[in-house]
Amino acid sequence: MSREGGFFSNLDWLTVFLYFILVTLGWFNIYASIYDPVQDLSILDFSINSGKQLLWIGSSAVLIIVILLLDFRIYESIAPLLYGVFIVLLIAVVIVGKEINGAKAWFQFGAFRLQPSELTKFATALLLARYVSTNSVKLTQFKSQMTAFLIMLFPVGLIMLQPDLGSALIFFSFMIPIFREGLPPIYLIAGLSLVIVGTLTIILPIQTIAIILGSVGVVWVLLTLKSIKNILLTLLIVGASIGFASGFHYAFENVLPKYQRDRILVIFYPDIVDPQGAGYNLNQSKIAIGSGGFAGKGFLDGTQTKFDFVPEQSTDFIFSTLAEEHGWLGSTFIIALFIGLMMRIVFIAERQKSQFARVYGYSIAGIIFFHFTINIAMTIGLFPVVGIPLPFFSYGGSSLWSFTIMLFVLLKIDMHRAQVLMRG
Amino acid sequence: MLENRRYIIQIFFIFIGLVFLVRLFALQVADDTYSTKAERNILQRIVEYPFRGLIYDRNNELIVYNEPMYDLMVVPRDIHIADTTEFCRLFDITRDEFDERIKTTKRYSRVKPSIFLKKISHEKYAQIQDQLYKFNGFYVNPRTVRRYSQPVLANELGYIGEISPSQLAKDTSGYQGGDYIGITGLEEYYEPELRGVRGVSYKMVNVRGIDKGSYKNGAIDTVSVAGKNLISTIDLNLQAYAETLLAGKRGSIVAIEPSTGEVMVMASAPSYDPNLLTGKYLGDNFEKIRSDTTSPLFNRPIMATYPPGSIFKTVQALIALDVGVTTTEEQVKVDLTKIGDHAPAGNYDVVKGLRYSSNNYFREIMRRLVTRGESSNYFIDSRLGLEKWTAAVEKFGFGNRLGIDVHGEVTGKVPDVDYYDGIYGENRWAYSNIQSLSIGQGELLVTPLQVANLAAIIANRGYYIKPHLIRAVEENDEVVPFKHEKIYPGNGTEYYPEIIEGMAQAVKQTAPRAIINDIEIIGKTGTAENGVKDESLDHSVFMAFAPRDNPQIAIAVYVENSGMGGRAAGMTASLIIEKFLRGYIKKNWWNREAYVLKGDFIDKEVN
């Protein structure tokens, strides 16, 4: 039974408003990123990215209408099927897909391109939500944890076959909903520790790592129980960590291709590593961003942007256009909008009665958060360059469609939250 | 309690947002190096090379002008070439050369432009300019090189080239690497006037180095200022004529306008086409010219020294008359016992002495100058006399640089007291040791310029103006002439008519082939002995001016290894005089021009 007050009265208009602002500002920003003062084309010109983005925006509007009209229950029921379809597509794209920039991530149908990994996030969010909301599943139990990880990581493995490191990384964002639903924190702590140790092996020699880990172990034992069991356990963990560090170090030096290694190293040694390649890209991005100053150089007046100094200006490095032309103030405003959107999504997720909807909601917040964080961190030199778009801002149809779908499915489900029986 | 995890997650989101804001603040607001780097990215500093000053001849004909030339510049960071083979083909370089050059420019700087290929001609530029868009990182910088309207005057004009590192180190006036600077000749001497002022324009460029407009609307650009033009004293057509007469021979021709000291002709042979030392092939051509055994770079009129020979007798006469050891009327009894002589014995006065070029007459004249009876000791007397003689000779412009406005002039040599002291020991020499000086041999060395200057002194009846090649500088469309002073070598001038008469007769006597029917040439032959027994290898020398009254041209001609002065040098001089005064060579029963051009001066039978 729908409430009286009209079809749209339950739609979370704040989120729709935030979506609309971000998409519109993103559209203007894409125009600025490809703007050439000599040619001075209109923002509506379809030969350039801003015109094309308008097509994607228009078609997204169609998608929104479709989503809002479809029955909200359909998503939960087709989750496994959808997930299966995209797993198949992920396998297929490695075989018959078109290779772009060293990765086979796209299907090409004439002029039309489709990137399966984008919508796989949607399918995974749905399946994960359905699984976790199953009564028998408790994320405090090992079996449930492993199954959840499997759902999350299976696509990662397939995507790494392409290989597309960036898209694969996004799937780790599902740790957020899993954590919300009860995953013991130890997983997160362990995960974070591994990341820290791995990062340290890049910049410190292995002997230093071993000494640090050993010292941490000693301090731990001193601070906690001094029982044999504790000491042995600590020894085991320290030993395993050193083993992990060595393995990681080996893989970093010998398995990872040089260009990817450089991309990581350039974060730590920006002036030395690969000045013509990775170093150059990052440096140009920082220059563009840094020269924006407090209030920016003005719309369409960003010299680094106008004169094409930042590579991938309208896609991966779209943020640098924004930062150059609108300065710190502009950057703050957009970051605030994104944080606001994410907070709102969490708020929406929390007010769901169905666990499925809540898990799904947190998944969406997590996905957007990871994209947001990694993309901006990339442009300011806090994260290695991996091709991750900034939601609503980076030029691209697949990206815009998938975020639109993910967001509005949530809004649709949210519209009908009163109709659902409490499930916990 | 799981609901509380919501706050952990939300706080985490906000935390990341704040990290970004802080980091962005550091990048954008706190640190302004990025602003500077951004500027540097887009800024391209383009040097506008100034238009070098032109040089005109005395009749306002262009001698040297500028032709456009292009340097291919490259910014290594921006290089992106799709087809290197095409690039190499277009620019006529091999793949190896290409790689080598790229390496060199990268070593210099990845982001600063450096020269990839120098001096691309105007024609070549027309061919390639449409293709340049294919090659990211390359652009063309227009320059100019010198071009010469006639392939003459190379030695005096000199050439320009890039400033060398050692010059740069010493320079304080603001030259930069890659600037052109005059290296020899007038280009070098008048470099400050000719070079102009560099201009700089700042352009905004995109990542490919493509010009995107003026930086700050040209607010900090400076305009280049063209160099000043020079008006030369040279008569270009006469110069060209003189060089054709010298073709295939070694020697010099210097012609001066006596009343002004303006050098109308200054020819050195062998020489080279000045157009060879400009443009792209300067380096190769320079090597060829430099290693040519005939030394075309050697500027003979001011660098070659010869014993003056009989020409010097005029100086002896002038000094003797000025000092008063003889008079214009005095008859001196001359026998042939002292030194070898072509002239007969008899009574000689100055006129006759010059006419027959009597060695013994002049031997006696100089004896009087050097031994004036100031000491009873022959050695000391000679010494005292020589001192005065040396000083007097030097006032005629010998033994020192005349100070012409190109560098490289040598002083020649007028032996003095110290010189002979060094050879013989102090006071152990006397006039008899040095008497060959009287006929212009011995240790005397003069340059052709000094000889021409001497002709001018006589033409002017007693003064000269420092010979010079540039008479004026053009400044802001205004011709500003240089000022000069008259220099008087002697105390009096009343005896000049006799000298001139003697020389007029000498032409008829010893250089009959030089005579022109309706133009009176006042001259003196000389044969500068080469020091070798074979007389055919002596240098032929002729000094003259014309016409007798109100002379317009004073000339000295040296033709090496061509025997007696009357022929080679004399005929060459007379042709030039006729060309200058009449404008053309009047047809004669005898084609004197062809004779001189052919250059076969030595009679087969030795007389």
Image (cartoon, rainbow, N blue to C red):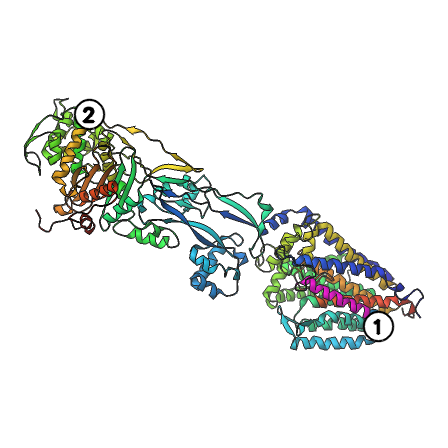
**Residue occupying image coordinates x 20% and y 30%:** B417
Return the residue nearer the eye: B152 or B447.
B152
Q: Amino acid at mark 1?
A: Leu
- Asked whether the residues under marks 2 and 1 belong to the same chain, the reply is no
- Residue wearing tag 2: B494
Q: What type of secondary structure mainly makes up the magenta span? A: helix
For the residues labelled 2 and 1, say whether their Cβ atoms are less than 8 Å apart. no
* In the rendered image, the vertical position of residue B471 relative to residue A253, given as above or below: above
**Residue occupying image coordinates x 57% and y 58%:** A276
- Residue wearing tag 1: A70
Q: Amino acid at mark 2?
A: Glu
Return the residue nearer the eye: B74 or B330.
B330
* In the rendered image, the vertical position of residue A409 relative to residue B162, given as above or below: below
Q: Numbered disc 1: what chain?
A: A
Circle 2 — which element?
loop
Nearest to viewer (mark 2 / mark 1): 2
* In the rendered image, the vertical position of residue A120 relative to residue B339, given as above or below: below
Circle 1 — which element?
loop
Magenta range is A47-66
Return the residue nearer the eye: B7 or A47.
A47
| Number of marks in the rendered image | 2
**Is A20 situated left or right of B283 in this image?**
right
Return the residue nearer the eye: B529 or B334.
B334
